[in-house]
Amino acid sequence: MPITRKSLVGTHWGNYEITTQDGVVENVQPSQQDSNPSPIGNVLYDISNSDYRIAQPMIRSSYLRGDPNHRMRRGKESFVPVSWDEALDLAASALKKTKDKAGNSGIYAGSYGWGSAGRFHHAQSQLHRFFNMIGGYTGSVNSYSAAAAEVIIPHVLGIDAFTAGKQLNLDDVAADCDYLVAFGGMSGYNNQNMPGGVGDHRDKNLVDKLVERGTEVISISPWASDTPSFLATEWITPRPCTDTAIMLGIAYELEVNGRVDTEFINSHTVGYDEFQSYLLGKTDGIPKDASWAASLAGIDPTDIQSLASRLAAANCPAITVSLSLQRAEHGEQTYWMAVVLSAMLGAFGKPGGGVGFMWMSNGTNIFNQIPFQWGKLPQGRNSVLQPIPVARVADMLLHPGETYTYNGKTRTYPDIHCIYWAGGNPFHHHQDLNRLRRAWRKPETVIVNESVWTATARHADIIFPANTFMERNDIVCGKDYFITPSKKALDHYADSRSDYDIFSGLAERMGVRDAFTEGRDEMEWLETIYQESRANAKKAGIDLPSFTEFWEAGEPINIEPQVKEWKNIFTQFRNQPNHHPLRTPSGKIEIFSSTIDSFGYDDCRGHPRWYDKREWLGGSRAKYFPLHMVSHQPRNKLHSQLDFSRFSRETKTHDHETVILHPADARERGIKDGMITRIFNDRGSCLAGAHLSDDIMPRVISLPTGAWFCPDDKEGPESLEYHGNPNVLTPDIGTSSLAQGPIAKSCLVDIEPFEGEIPDVKAQLKPVISPGTDR
Ligand SMILES: Nc1nc2c(c(=O)[nH]1)N[C@H]1C(S)=C(S)[C@@H](COP(=O)(O)OP(=O)(O)OC[C@H]3O[C@@H](n4cnc5c(=O)[nH]c(N)nc54)[C@H](O)[C@@H]3O)O[C@H]1N2
Ligand SMILES: Nc1nc2c(c(=O)[nH]1)N[C@H]1C(S)=C(S)[C@@H](COP(=O)(O)OP(=O)(O)OC[C@H]3O[C@@H](n4cnc5c(=O)[nH]c(N)nc54)[C@H](O)[C@@H]3O)O[C@H]1N2
Ligand SMILES: [Mo]
């Protein structure tokens, strides 16, 4: 008799009803509560593909042999399958040795990454809880998504950037905004994924309302498909990384034409005078007028003048900025300048107007703040007090003991002897992967919990095979109003275990098992976490059913009807600046920040400015590498997750990632649609299939992120990555001395037809598994 199982499973990209038969996924149906489900659910059909799943614990051959030169072979070597006991013993002994030799700061467990959506089986929470119990670890702060925004926004507006992002929501915009300038566009694709899960992708319904309302939407972006054609009323195509210059040009036009709301500036901001001197060119002899801005951005000055006059004439204008704008050199400036512009227009804090951050990504602008704290796995306290800015990981490994600046402080990189990663893929997310490969040789031991053979798993010494969210019970509740009982749809793949079981095994060997597990199994932990959430909800006036009712009903709960009216912090400040001051030093919007000015950074001074850049189309490097490469988020998956699935591979070109380029650039180089090309600069090169399209502006190419890193044996400019991973080309430099965020987007390249024999990507993705005799 075939065994059929039906389970509701929560993922970062939605809730799905999964039907399995004898351990095989037969059907994936989006939850009925989702009004606009994401097709990304289709990746789930291949979650148990044995070509890519890790079946049992593995040790890299030369590490197992104790070869003193083993570190040089990392990422280029076979693995030996071992028992759980052997792998856990070896890992525990490596952790003990590191603690003895280098102290707990010698363990890097920042372990950035999206992992899976559940509240209990959240890989980083498990990892950090475990390490806190054995004396701590070097951690990380901020994210690859939003680092520059996370550091600049608290200085300028006195709140964290994610909360700031929620203040302009699409409901209000759809109701009130009459003129929206969308820097970085307004793509529907990037709201498919929300950290921690999503019950209803409602953004499409709100966008429809906006269209019905007849709001003018100006898309400022190199790529037309960043804004649906039915929504954009106009498309302006500046050179990438010049948005701050355009905003300054608009500001200048407002200033000289007497369109600045001086009343608002006087009552709600500080430092306009210093900024104004710069804007008018009094401090540096360069007026930031429309011609100045247009020549930097490569657009027409009349576009800037027209934007300024239409913004000033609108009743409720909004300026929105995507996350991509700040993932660039001087990325802090775009977010700061967008605030200043909204203040000059007197629009800051108008419901449905003003400034919108993290626009149309990760669900930021489509759900208001949940009025209570969800329960989570207790984390304990980390005794190692100095985390690194997350994107400085390769710098840390390459420069132990050296100093760096971060948000007004000078800090020292620790000396890392052991890396432990769970729930992330640095060989997907980090920039300049050839440099990361070199840096990765520094530690004595690298331990990774992974389900599949990602490049990060291939660059480990000890791999613990983690099971997936399809193989566990969990509670999924992210940024929206849904709480989902996520139920096991499959048994553990082969010999894989949950991160919880892996860390329980390690905790036992480190003498802290009881403290780590508190004697609870999976279901007991779920109940504990749910009870805590329920108690918090009650205090906020929201009733949740008992855990048993919730679990047995097996349906997502939507708390929205119980959420009381929501208060917009920016509107409160706008209406009553003295009663509801911002939590900045002045209580107002800091157009000039004395705090930032006091840091004395050359690349981030007291007010927003245009800074010249290392890599952009207006710079001297463009003589050698004349195209700007942006790397958008993949439409059909989350980052690199399940990249091997048939659904992800549908958009590839013979298994290579597909790059979008303008027909004129292709013609100049003899590139035809569908051809395999080589994209290169002086950091590396990769193969990608060409897709020619007028939707992208000339001299810009876009290569999505997510193709699993598949390098040849060389490193540096001569190396070739086979799959189409943009991060062999991107620079590994901080946004500025302030935030030290990643700058994946500031990247010049060239592209040519690929002449050699086309390598077989699939064959390269899995390492050689040696029989146990190879010791
Ligand atoms: N060039 C370029 N680079 C970028 C970006 C860009 O725009 N351009 N964007 C950046 C951004 S914004 C981000 S957020 C990052 C994303 O970078 P990551 O978050 O690192 O990318 P993911 O592919 O989501 O990696 C998650 C990994 O966790 C594993 N995993 C999932 N569930 C579990 C689990 O339960 N346990 C364990 N142990 N593992 C699990 C998955 O198999 C996967 O390998 O990339 C950044 N990199
Ligand atoms: N389907 C899907 N959705 C996702 C993700 C995913 O992996 N898959 N990842 C999620 C994550 S973790 C994050 S952080 C967000 C990221 O959200 P974003 O950062 O907004 O997304 P991107 O796709 O990197 O960039 C959006 C667009 O900005 C445009 N752009 C690039 N550079 C410039 C520039 O200099 N100026 C202007 N004006 N426009 C520019 C590009 O054409 C690009 O398509 O997306 C989230 N959503
Ligand atoms: Mo992100």
Image (cartoon, rainbow, N blue to C red):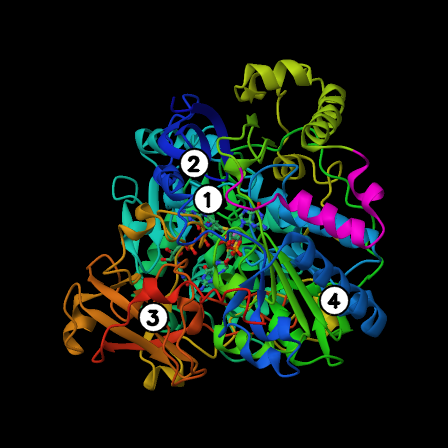
Residue shown at 37% from the left, 46% from the top: 187
Q: Secondary structure at mark 2?
A: loop
Q: Residues within 10 Å of mark 2 (few under 14, many from 20)?
A: many
Residue shown at 53% from the left, 34% from the top: 351
Q: Secondary structure at mark 1?
A: strand
- Mark 2 and mark 1 residues within 8 Å of each other at the beta carbon: yes
Instruction: Give the residue at mark 1.
Output: 318
Mark 3 or mark 1, earlier in chain: 1
Distance (Cα) linking label 3 and label 4:
34 Å
Instruction: Give the residue at mark 4.
Output: 94
Q: Quadrant of residue 382?
A: bottom right
- Give yes or no for residue 510 being in the magenta stretch: yes
- Residue behind label 4 places its C-beta within 8 angstroms of ligand 1: no
Distance (Cα) linking label 3 and label 1:
42 Å
Instruction: Give the residue at mark 2.
Output: 177
Q: What's under tag 2, amino acid-wise?
A: Cys
Distance (Cα) linking label 2 and label 4:
58 Å
Determine whether 323 is above or below 766 in the image. above
Q: Residues within 10 Å of mark 3 (few under 14, many from 20)?
A: many
Instruction: Give the residue at mark 3.
Output: 722
Between 57 and 306, the one nearer to me in the picture: 57
Per the rendered image, the range of residues in magenta is 492-519
Distance (Cα) linking label 2 and label 1:
7 Å
Mark 1 or mark 4, earlier in chain: 4
Q: Residues within 10 Å of mark 4 (few under 14, many from 20)?
A: some
